[in-house]
Amino acid sequence: MKSYVIFDLDGTLLKTIDDLAAATNHALRTLGFPTHGLWVYPNMVGNGVAKLLERALPDDARTEKNINDALAAFKEYYDVHCCDATAPYPGITELLAELSAKSVNLAVTSNKYQQAVSKIIGHYFPDISFRAILGNVEGMPRKPDPSIVFKALSLCPTPKADVLYVGDSGVDIETARRACVESVGVTWGFRPIHELKAAYADHIISTPSQIIDLL
C-alpha cells in the first residue's frame, strides 16, 4: 500500500493561475512592458517564478536585469495578493482529509519560492498535517530535478515503492521518473492531457477521489 503521497502545488492542489497572472502583469506594468491575457499563463507556468517572468517578458527584453527587477516586483505584489483568487480544486480538501484519516503521509513540493508556498498551504489547508512543505530555496535546483522529492523523502523516510507523486504537468511526471517513484498526472490542472501522456505518466486521473483507489 502507498503510504506517502507527494503533491505538486499549482494546478494540482490549488487553482492559482489568476493570482499568478495578476502578479506577473503587475511586474510587467511596473517595468513598462505589455501585459498578457489570463489564457496565456497556463502555458508559461511550471518552472518557477523566474522562468515565468522570463517567458512573460518580450523576446528582446529577457535580460538578467529585467528578470531580476520583474521578480522583485512580482514578489512584492504576490506576497500580499497570493490568496485573492486562488482556491482548492473541487474535491481536494476532502481528499487531503481522507488521506490524513487513513494515516497516509502527505507532502507538497513546488517550484514556487518557499515563502509563498508556506503561506498558501497554511492559508488553504490549516488543518492538514503535511510531513513536508517544500518550495524553491537558494541552492536547490528546480523540478524536474528530483532533489526536492529526495528532500521530502528525507523528512519522511519511505520506500520509493510506497510513494505516489501527483502533478499536473510533464515537468511533474519527469520529476517522478527521475526520483524513481510512481507518477500520477491530473487532468484538472494547467496542462493538457497529451502532455501527461507524452511524459509517460504511470496513471492519469480526472478526479481527486481516484487517488484513493491508487493507494
Image (cartoon, helix red, strand yellow):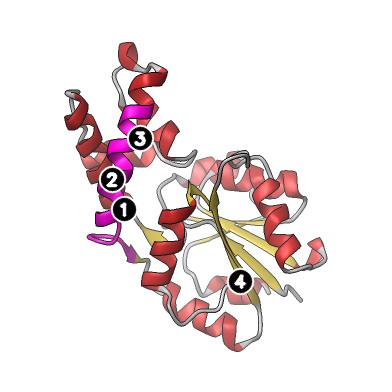
* Secondary structure of residue under mark 2: helix
Q: Residue at x 25, y 47 (%)?
A: 77
Mark 3, secondary structure of its residue: helix
Which dot marks residue 198? Answer: none
Find the magenta span and give its range.
68-87
Is residue 200 visible in the rendered structure shown here? no
Separation (CA) of disc 3 from disc 2: 9 Å
Label 4–label 1 contact, CB within 8 A = no
For the residues marked 2 and 4, what is the alpha-carbon distance in whole angstroms?
30 Å
The reply to whether discs 3 and 2 touch (Cβ–Cβ < 8 Å) is: no
Pair 2/4: label in front: 2
Residue 97 pos. (x, y %):
50, 83
Apparent side of residue 210 relative to residue 73 in the rendered image (left or right)? right
Q: Amino acid at mark 3?
A: Leu
Identify which residue is drawn at 80% across, 61% down.
Answer: 160
**Residue 25 vertical placement versus 5 (above, below):** above
Of badges 4 and 1, the one in the foreground is 1
Q: Which residue is at a point 32% across and 39% down the rendered structure image? A: 41
Check if residue 73 falls in the magenta segment: yes
Residue 83 falls in which quadrant of the image? Answer: bottom left
Mark 4 lies on residue = 106
Could you classify mark 2 by the number of other residues whose Cα lies within 10 Å: few (under 14), some (14-19), or many (20 or more)? some
Q: Secondary structure at mark 4?
A: strand
Where residue 209 appears, as percent x and y from the top left, is 51, 75
In the rendered image, which quarter contains the N terminus? Answer: bottom right
**Residue indicated by mark 1:** 79
Q: Amino acid at mark 4?
A: Leu
Residue that extends furthest to the bottom in the rendered view of this protein? 101
